[in-house]
Amino acid sequence: MPATITMDQIKSSPPTANRATLATPPQKSAPAGRTLIDIEKLNFFYGESQALHDINLAIPEKKVTAFIGPSGCGKSTLLRCLNRMNDLIDVARVASGSIKIHDIDIYAPDVDVIELRKRVGMVFQKSNPFPKSIYENITYGLRLQGVADKSRLDEVVERSLRGAALWDEVKDRLHTSGLGLSGGQQQRLCIARAIAVEPEIILMDEPCSALDPIATAKVEELIHELKEKFTIVIVTHNMQQAARCSDRTAFFYLGKLIEYAETQTIFMNPGNPQTEAYVSGRFG
Ligand SMILES: Nc1ncnc2c1ncn2[C@@H]1O[C@H](COP(=O)(O)OP(=O)(O)OP(=O)(O)O)[C@@H](O)[C@H]1O
């Protein structure tokens, strides 16, 4: 079972006073299920250019939440805010607002970012296995944490590969290069690598955009299975994929959250004309 984020795990010291001074947020759509990630009045800039405007979003646990919207609307930026990957970009900054996971502000100065990224894993658009064996790809994160026990590593490799629906295809070639797998297998290997360290949340940035329809179907099926254990947030350009895979959908336009609701509502009965125009293919 994946571990739950605790204060001790993602924080290196007790809460600071500044967290309590955040302004009361305006009302936001309530998620179906317990809120795990709570985004409040988030304003984000690249240099002088504002990429996200006053985002309020409550993401439920153990569900799949899709971010959709036309190119440049800020989907990936918001996704990367959730595990502070944007910290790696010099000009990027959260100007105001907060993102809380289990009620802990992940931008508080005392948060251990490495620990946060362990709890909030990421799978990218293009699969990026390390140029190492399948086995070493999966065990890399654990070894960094100092785990050396072979039977424990073997067990994690099998569990992670089974979890990523890849075990049967690779169990006889664990010590061959991960780069020798097909594109779809490589993406599932990256998912296996992400779940090996037992995150609670998995962020996926267009995970199927480089895959053919068969590999895409496998990853979509996998996403469906993974939500039993993990909270998943997925960015996708593919409307059908959002409709098939997700429980909740957030539609963004020009850096603003336009509508957030049950996926079925967004696609069948959207409340906003811009959402309606986008999901029906009239723009974007
Ligand atoms: N590293 C960066 N430096 C400066 N501006 C950036 C950077 N990354 C993204 N932006 C800008 O921020 C805005 C939002 O980009 P983002 O990539 O989040 O959008 P997106 O909705 O994910 O787009 P796409 O669907 O094309 O991937 C865009 O105007 C983009 O040009």
Image: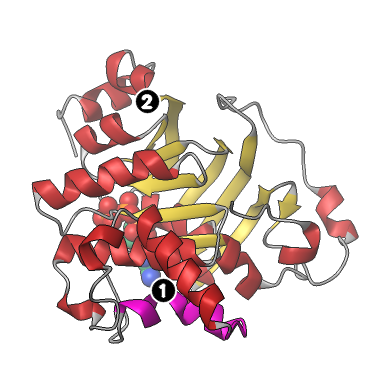
Judged from this view, the residue extending furthest toward the top is: 269
Q: Which residues are magenta?
A: 134-148
Q: Amino acid at mark 1?
A: Ile
Q: Residue at x 28, y 86 (%)?
A: 131
Observer-side mark, 2 or 1, equals 1
* Magenta residues, dominant SS class: helix
Q: Is residue 263 left or right of residue 119?
A: left
Residue at mark 2: 263
Above or below, comparing residue 111 to residue 281 in the picture: below
Where residue 49 appears, x then y in whole percent? 44, 61
Residue 46 can be seen, yes or no: no
How is the protein colored in the picture? secondary structure
Residue 213 located within the stretch drawn in magenta: no
Identified at 84% across, 58% down, the residue is 18
The numbered mark, 2 or 1, whose residue comes first in the sequence reads 1
Q: Quadrant of ligand 1?
A: bottom left
Q: Quadrant of residue 171?
A: bottom left
Q: Say if disc 2 is inside 8 Å of ligand 1.
A: no
- Lateral position of residue 245 relative to residue 103, left or right: left
SS at mark 2?
helix
Q: Which element type, helix, strand or loop, lies under badge 1?
A: helix
User: Is 143 within the magenta?
Assistant: yes
Instruction: Determine if residue 139 is in view.
Output: yes
Amino acid carrying label 2: it is Thr
Q: Percent from the top left, x then y, of residue 86? A: 49, 68
Residue 282, compared with residue 148, is above or below; it is above
- Which residue is pictured at 49% across the width and 39% down the height? 228
For the C terminus, give its image quadrant.
top left
Query: Callout 2: 10 Å neighbours few (<14), some, many (20+)?
Result: many
Circle on res. 138: 1
- In this rendered view, identify the residue nearer to me: 152 or 277: 152
Closer to the camera in the image, 226 or 135: 135
